[in-house]
Structures are given as structure tokens and as C-alpha cells.
Image (tube, helix red, strand yellow):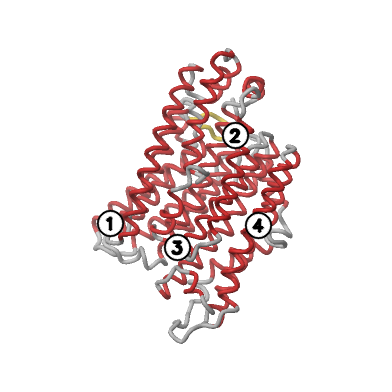
Amino acid sequence: MGTVESLVQFYPELALSGAVLAVILIDVMLRAGSIVPGLVALLGSLLALVLTTGLPPVGIAGLITDSAPSWLFGRMLVLDGFSLFFKVLLGLALVMVVWMSLHSREVRGRANEGEYYALLLSSGLGMFLMAGAANLLMAYLSLEFVSLTSYVLTGFLRHNRRSGEAALKYLIYGGVASGAMIYGMSWIFGLTGAMDYPGIARGVAHLDPASRPAMFLALILVFTGFGYKISMVPFHMWAPDVYTGAPIPVTAFLAVGSKAAGFAMLLRFFHFGVAPSEAAATLGRLPLVELGSVLCVATMTLGNLAALSQTNLKRLLAYSSIAHAGYALLGFVVFAEAGVQAVLFYLAVYYTMNLGAFWVVMLVANATGREDIEGYRGLAWRGGALASVALAVFLFSLAGLPPLAGFLGKFYVFAAGVEGRLYALVVIGLVNSVVSLYYYARVVKVMFLDRPEPDDPPMKFRLVGDLGVVGVLAAVNVVLILRFDWLLSLVQSAGRVFTG
């Protein structure tokens, strides 16, 4: 489609753009600390989500129907079931994080609150573009746009030294990864003569043997940029400091939204951009699977081992997020349709359990100002029984214990690994899951079995305002294992990507 025709399918992104402008204008006109910019941001993100579910294929249920995908803006973006699946997931994440921000004491009432919501919506807009990027230029611009807004959001607490340090580290690591990625993209363009993914695939299919080492190096450099976005080892070093220093809603958005957008780009580029059937013979001679397998093992193992010694719950969840990127990479290295579907299913489940865990962390931080695990001592007996039960559900789901949703996610990822005959990776993944159970159970033990000290303050959470969303997310983690067929149908449809 041309520019004018493409605008009809670009309504969600236009809604987010309009919401950004509205938040900025309202923030200028109203006094500092007003709640109105946050409410406008919430309405804008909800509108974008509704418009996304109304795109063809119509509605979320429509993802399982056959509908003609299309190129947008001269093959810069693509609209298909794959991009819609991620846009719905990212839209849900954006809505929930804006709602979290309205309840966060780190955000509410600050003089630059309006700027915060404008940046948050802008980051969501960039992630929507990442989900549909089908051109090297669009992939780079959208990823860089998300990165720049994330740097500023991380340093939102301007008078907090920890927040400023995290933003600076994020900027440095991101700049290096971004430079490596665009250098690799320039090599790919030089070797194939194309910017759009179908053209790159055709160029790879006809690549002469002498150019294969250069192509492999270029792919490694591009993998660096995508790996930084999903906090994959060895490009993970920013995650613990950023997750600890950023406001909790921003941390949740980076853990859920940014990771999902990164995997959307990673899968589309490597599975459907440079490795469709006509290029498989050429890429089969390159050790992509071996490289991905090594990074998969390193990511899940380092994440879990580093989490064992953490005393700050946000930092523990940061290393947990790194480990879960490793589990999802197991589906990626299968390089088959089953692997893509497993990654999509896993990311959808990961959304419910990780976002719920960060929501409880925010509630406790609001009440006590503490993020360390000792601050959760005897939480179940200090008026936080429901919050403790919900957090236990989320943590055990992250560990992959049945009958919780996290068990389903890991089951499909490991099943894809078995189908791809990656038995060693599956065994290592199972061992890592057992290791992770220790540090998740340690938090649950502190909440339920440790006696509170006299100076530990009592907790009081509102049943609807504070615990309502937490209860819904916890219920989803319990109920999803009984009725997961609808999600599996969506994933199977979204896994059939349009390659032109």
C-alpha cells in the first residue's frame, strides 16, 4: 500500500501519536502534578488497543481466520497476524503500565508527570512499529526510538542517584549495541542490495560462497542489537541496574513490553527475513543454530545463578527476566514453525506472571518504601495476605510449577526443543527451572514463614483499587491451564508470518 492507503491500517499508531500530543498540551495548560495527563494517557492506550483488535483480521478472535496481509508505507511495515498478535500484547502491556503509574507513589504528583506519560506512550508507539517492521531502516529507527525514550524514563527520578546511574549505564550499553547493529545492517545491505526482508532473503539465496563469512559476521552484529533489547547474555549487563533504578512501572514495561517487541523483531528478521525456504540452503552452512544454542544456555544459566544471591526483589526479577529470555531463545533456535509458536505462547504467559509480580512489588513499595526481600518479612501476617498469595502464584508460575500458566509456557518451549532434537538444551532448561525454584521459594518463605519484627509496619491494601488487577492476573495464571486452547489457536495463526 501507498502512504494514503496505509493510513487506514495505521489507526492504533495514530491514536498513540494523538494521545502523546494531547498529554503534552494538557500538561502545559494545567498545574504540575495534575492527574489529567495520566487519565488521557490511559484513554489513549485503551483506544490504541481497541483499534488494534479492530484491524483485519477483525478482532483478536479474527487472528485465527484467514485474511489477506498487506505491506504498509511502501514495504516499510507489514500488517499480518504476527504483528497484530504482538500489537495486542504490547497494547495490553501499555494499558496496564499506565494504570500502574497512576497508582505509583514514584510517579504520582511529580512536576514532570505529564512528560512521563508522553514518553511512555511514545515508547509504546515505537514498540508497535517494532512489531510490524519489515525493513532494515524501519527496524533500526523503531528500536532506537524505543531505546531513547526508555533511557529518559529510566532516569525519571531526577534526584535519585540510583535512577540517574541506571539511565547512564543504559545509554552507554544501548549506544554500543545500536552502533554494532546498524554496522551489521549496512553489511547486509551491501551484500544483498536490499533493505526490505523479502529482498534480503532473495539476496541471501543467491549469495556466493566467498561472501558467506561476511554475511555471518553481519548477522552476529545485528543479533547484538536485538539481543540487547531482550537482555540476552552477553548483552544483559544493563538490565539489573536499570530494573533496580527505574520507577517500578517503567521496570515492568521494560520487562514485558520491551522484551516482547525485541522478540518480535528477532523472530521476523531471522526466521522470516533472512531464513525462508529459498535462503535455507545458504544459511544452513552458517552456524546460526550453534551460536543461538550457546547464547541460549548462557542466558538462562547466568540469569538463574546470579538471581540466587540477590537481596533486592527488583534486582532478583531482573535476573529472572534474563533467565526467561534464555527459555524463549530455546524456541527461537529451533528454526521451525513450532519454535515460533512456542515463543509467542511463552511471551503471552510471561506477560501475566511478570506484570503481576511487579504490581505487588509496587504495592509494597508504596506502603513501606522498601524493595528488599527483608521488607516482605511476615507480609502475609501484616495485613498483606491476599498480596502474598498473589505474589506466590506469580513466582511459582515463573518457576514453571503446575498447575500454573508458567508450566504451560515452559512445556511448549521444551516441547519445541524436543521436536527440533535439541535435547541438550531442553535438559539444561529443565535443570535451570529447578535452580530458579530456590530463589522464588525463598521470597515465598520470607512472606509466609518468617515472623515479622516489631518495627515492620502493618499493611493495608484497598480490595479493588490495589488488589483488583493483581487478583485478575493471579486468576489468569491459575485458570489458563484449564482453558488454553483459545490462546493456542491465536498463537498458531500468528505464527504464519507474511513474507511477501
Mark 4 vs mark 2, foreground winner is 2
**Disc 4 to disc 2: CB gap under 8 Å:** no
Residue that badge 2 annotates = 291
333 is higher (above) or lower (below) than 485: above
Picture quadrant where residue 332 is located: top right
* Nearest to N terminus: mark 1 or mark 4: 1
278 relative to 374 in the view: left or right:
right
* Nearest to N terminus: mark 3 or mark 4: 3
Q: Residue at x 47, y 83 (%)?
A: 458
Residue that badge 1 annotates = 27
Q: In what element is the residue under mark 2? A: helix
Q: Nearer the viewer, residue 252 or 295?
A: 295
Mark 1 vs mark 2, foreground winner is 2
Which label belongs to residue 406? 4
The amino acid pointed to by label 2 is Leu
Which label belongs to residue 462? none
| Cα distance between the residues tagged 3 and 1 | 19 Å
Mark 3 vs mark 4, foreground winner is 4
* Nearest to N terminus: mark 4 or mark 2: 2
| Cα distance between the residues tagged 3 and 2 | 38 Å
* Nearest to N terminus: mark 3 or mark 2: 3
Q: In what element is the residue under mark 4? A: helix
**Disc 3 to disc 2: CB gap under 8 Å:** no
Residue that badge 3 annotates = 100
| Cα distance between the residues tagged 4 and 2 | 27 Å
